[in-house]
Image (cartoon, rainbow, N blue to C red):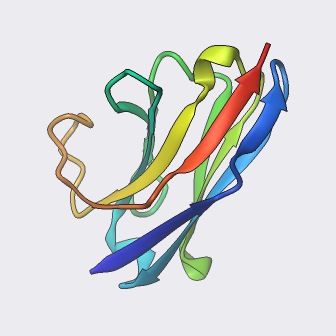
Amino acid sequence: QVQLVESGGGLVQAGGSLGLSCAASGRTLSSYVMGWFRQAPGKEREFVATITRSGSSIYYADSVKGRFTISRDNAKNMVFLQMNSLKPEDTAVYYCAAAAYWRGTSASTVWGYWGQGTQVTVSS
């Protein structure tokens, strides 16, 4: 069992940057594949990025590739999402999630643990 708490959301102008953090408690974070997701008003939750247990493999959604960077610090039980060149369409509640195994795609991976989310708003 792991508990996840996101922080770092806020209001930023288009073109700006924001860094999100996800703190884990309970089991050690190194036991889990970690992911970031987001959900905009009226839309389904969508995959943003994922990082494997050791950080050796990272995958991004096409919509954020080249702008967002996921990273992790297993010693501190933290996962991060650095977001640069933000656009109004990046506005959403951002969630971190944990999975025991990466099954090749986000849709086929069982994300067993979720944080409560943090709001990111990008103004035009």
Q: Quadrant of the C terminus?
A: top right
Q: Residue at x 64, y 32 (%)?
A: 68
Name the outermost residue toward the front: 42
Relative horizontal placement of residue 93, taking residue 82 as reference (left or right)? left
Q: Nearer the viewer, residue 4 or 41?
A: 41
Q: Image point 37% across, 21% down: which residue? A: 43
Q: Quadrant of the N terminus?
A: bottom left
The answer to whether residue 57 is above or below residue 75 is: above
Q: Is residue 63 above or below residue 37?
A: above
Report the side of 124 relative to 118 (left or right): right
Q: Quadrant of residue 46?
A: top left
Please tell me in which quadrant of the rendered image residue 52 appears: bottom left
Among the 4 quarters of the image, the one containing residue 16 = top right
Indicate the position of residue 89 as horizontal and vertical percent values: 60, 16
Find residue 116 and report its horizontal and vertical position in percent. 45, 59
Residue 85 coordinates in the image, percent (x, y): 77, 22
The location of residue 56, given as percent across then percent down, is: 46, 52
Q: Nearer the viewer, residue 64 or 16?
A: 16
Q: How many tags in the picture?
A: 0
Residue in the picture at 14% in, 38% down: 108
